């Protein structure tokens, strides 16, 4: 294909056809302009600096100081570093705003010389949430496996069921949106190519606005991360806030990497995970209130108005979901 990458087994998708192949070449070339840290303050800031040490940490939030962006956490022993204790940690503004006393979390403890200890990559760790998301991932794995070597779902087929976290750390089972239309794509917050994920998000926002203006009811916009390793609920929340996104019907979802990979293969998105970067194709889908995929656009050259034109409009009569 003129691109030196290997697709994960099962992801090379015959059904997506020539258009996807074209987009793959085009898009991957676009996304492979790797900044290598010299460009983009977000990326540079997020790259591990020399002398930084990272440790997995789990514990319970005791109190939250949102103004000072501090969490007091009763944490378990950190192997090779310290015993269990109550301690304060710096976190991002978004993570501080999501944190609730009594909540269990797992995170990465980051220690750097001359800095106060901070927590990054914060995930919910309460048994109910973790159990629901893991059960969803297991069911999705089985479903993907059952679909055979090519799990891709064509337009006209139902979307798969899945369970992920949204940007508030709430568990979202997508079948909860049954009866509503869904417009869905995949992005990741660190995407360095303005013509890829940043453009996709801008177009989703435009579509959201146009749909509202057109009087479209019962529409949910959903962006699933391509990079759950970094895109925690807090990171996605910040991504939405920075862009001023109206999250009343626009969710950013993340979860176990296995579930994300299964969704990528079922939705026909090719992604190669390469350190901090993901080389990927783009797909934007419209799903009807019954969960059926009714339209898809590959690549980034799609028109928000085309999607709005395909959305069901007018009042959805009770029980009239098709
Ligand atoms: Cu991207």
Image (cartoon, rainbow, N blue to C red):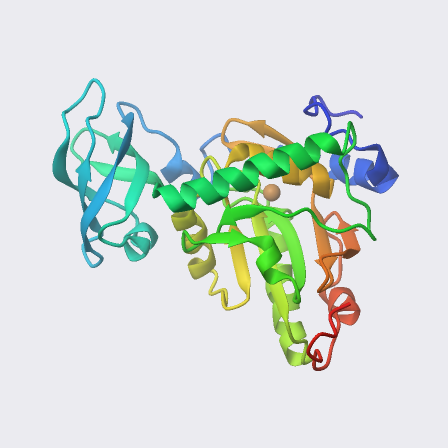
Outermost residue toward the top in this view:
80
Question: Relative to 277, does residue 235 appear above or below in the rendering?
Answer: below
At 70% from the left edge and 82% from the top edge, which residue is drawn? 315
Image x and y of residue 140, in percent: 62, 38
Q: Is residue 301 left or right of residue 239?
A: right
Q: Depth check: give the residue in front, 104 or 320.
A: 320
Q: Is residue 148 left or right of residue 251?
A: right
Residue 223 in sight here: yes
Question: Relative to 310, does residue 100 appear above or below in the rendering?
Answer: above
Image x and y of residue 138, in percent: 57, 34
Q: Is residue 180 left or right of residue 152?
A: left
In the rendered image, the quadrant that contains the N terminus is top right
The quadrant in which residue 193 appears is top right
Mark count: 0
Residue 34 in sight here: no
Image x and y of residue 29, in percent: 69, 34
Q: Is residue 132 left or right of residue 206?
A: left
At 84% from the left edge and 33% from the top edge, which residue is drawn? 14
The quadrant in which residue 290 appears is bottom right
Image x and y of residue 96, in percent: 27, 53
Q: Which quarter of the rendered image does ligand 1 occupy? A: top right
At 86% from the left edge and 38% from the top edge, which residue is drawn? 17
């Amino acid at each position: 294909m003129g691109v030196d990458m290997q697709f994960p087994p099962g992801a090379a998708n015959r059904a997506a056809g020539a258009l996807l192949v074209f987009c793959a070449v085009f898009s991957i070339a676009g996304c492979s302009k790797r900044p290598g840290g010299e460009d983009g303050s977000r990326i540079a800031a997020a790259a591990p600096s020399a002398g930084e040490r990272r440790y997995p940490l789990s514990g319970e939030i005791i109190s939250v100081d949102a103004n000072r962006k501090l969490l007091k956490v009763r944490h378990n022993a950190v192997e090779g570093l310290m015993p269990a204790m109550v301690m304060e940690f710096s976190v991002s503004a978004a993570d501080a705003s999501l944190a609730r006393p009594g909540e269990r979390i797992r995170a990465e403890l980051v220690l750097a010389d001359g800095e106060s200890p901070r927590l990054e990559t914060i995930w919910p760790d309460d048994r109910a949430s973790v159990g629901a998301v893991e059960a969803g991932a297991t069911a999705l794995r089985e479903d993907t496996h059952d679909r055979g070597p090519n799990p891709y779902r064509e337009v006209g087929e139902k979307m798969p069921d899945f369970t992920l976290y949204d940007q508030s750390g709430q568990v979202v089972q997508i079948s909860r949106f049954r009866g509503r239309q869904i417009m869905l794509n995949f992005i990741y917050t660190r995407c360095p190519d303005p013509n890829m994920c940043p453009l996709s998000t801008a177009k989703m926002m435009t579509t959201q606005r146009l749909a509202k203006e057109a009087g479209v009811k019962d529409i949910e916009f959903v962006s699933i991360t391509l990079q759950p390793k970094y895109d925690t609920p807090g990171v996605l929340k910040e991504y939405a806030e920075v862009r001023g996104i109206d999250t009343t019907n626009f969710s950013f979802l993340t979860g176990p990497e296995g579930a994300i990979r299964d969704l990528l293969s079922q939705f026909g998105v090719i992604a190669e995970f390469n350190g901090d970067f993901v080389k990927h194709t783009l797909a934007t889908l419209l799903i009807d209130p019954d969960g059926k995929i009714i339209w898809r656009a590959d690549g980034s050259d799609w028109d928000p108005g085309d999607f709005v034109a395909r959305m069901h409009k007018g009042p959805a009569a009770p029980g009239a979901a098709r």
